[in-house]
Amino acid sequence: MMVAPSLLSADFSRLGEECAALEEAGADWIHFDVMDGAYVPRITIGPVVVEHCRRWSKLPFDVHLMIDHPESQIEAFRDAGATTLSVHVEAVTHIHRVLHQIREAGMRAGVCLNPGSPLGRVEPVLPEADLLVIMSVNPGWGGQAFIEASLGRIQQARALRDRLNPKLDIEVDGGVNALSGRQCAQRGATVLVAGHFVYSHPQGKRAAIAELR
């Protein structure tokens, strides 16, 4: 089980230092939530911020694009230092092509699925992906409550992974805490994204990451 703390709950005035602190606290990946104000209502960060954060950490950067036309930003995030680049199947017309473009750019390719979208939308491209992101909240805001119905979807996704692509990572993003994280792991998740839980833990980031793991 890998833990990928999300910077969405971090202090945005010192994101580089936050990346260094997460590495020191034992994170496996660092998760970046990129929002454009169109695909989701909020606006967060872009490639320049990721590039500056790269100076502070050697951990894999897990970049989650919640944007329209993500294919236009592939090279920019590659140059900024992204390790994995994930796009929403709902935001692109030709998901197969976009996943190949991400891989050809030298990054791991991820495909994201919103709570209201059936798993069948991503099943055809799972052999071409490195990461499947199951959204367990509606994208756009941190601190939301975990959607319980996500557990069944994770279990179904794990069955598809075992049949179609055993090297695929299954990442759960949204409302992850000690309880929901354990439930996700029991159903086959391999990566947990956690923002609010990590940054609000009374004993700090290291304790939160250790508790999740």
Image: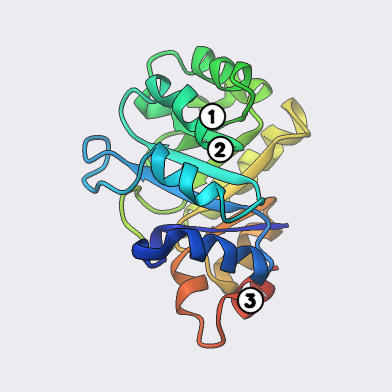
Q: Quadrant of residue 206?
A: bottom right
Q: Which three-letter amino acid code belongs to the residue tagged 2?
A: Ala
Residue drawn at point x = 34 percent, y = 64 percent: 13
Q: Residues within 10 Å of mark 1 (few under 14, many from 20)?
A: many
Q: Are marks 2 and 1 in contact (CB under 8 Å)?
A: yes
| 4 left or right of 8 in image | right
What residue is shown with label 3?
A: 206
Residue drawn at point x = 47 percent, y = 73 percent: 199
| 211 left or right of 82 in image | right
Is label 2 or label 3 in front?
2
Q: Nearer the viewer, residue 44 or 181?
A: 44
What residue is shown with label 2?
A: 82
Identify whether 48 is placed above or below 75: below
Percent of width and height locating residue 204: 55, 81
Q: Earlier in the sequence, mark 2 or mark 3?
A: 2
Q: Residues within 10 Å of mark 2 (few under 14, many from 20)?
A: many
Distance (Cα) linking label 3 and label 1: 29 Å
What residue is shown with label 1?
A: 78
Q: Nearer the viewer, residue 50 or 1?
A: 50
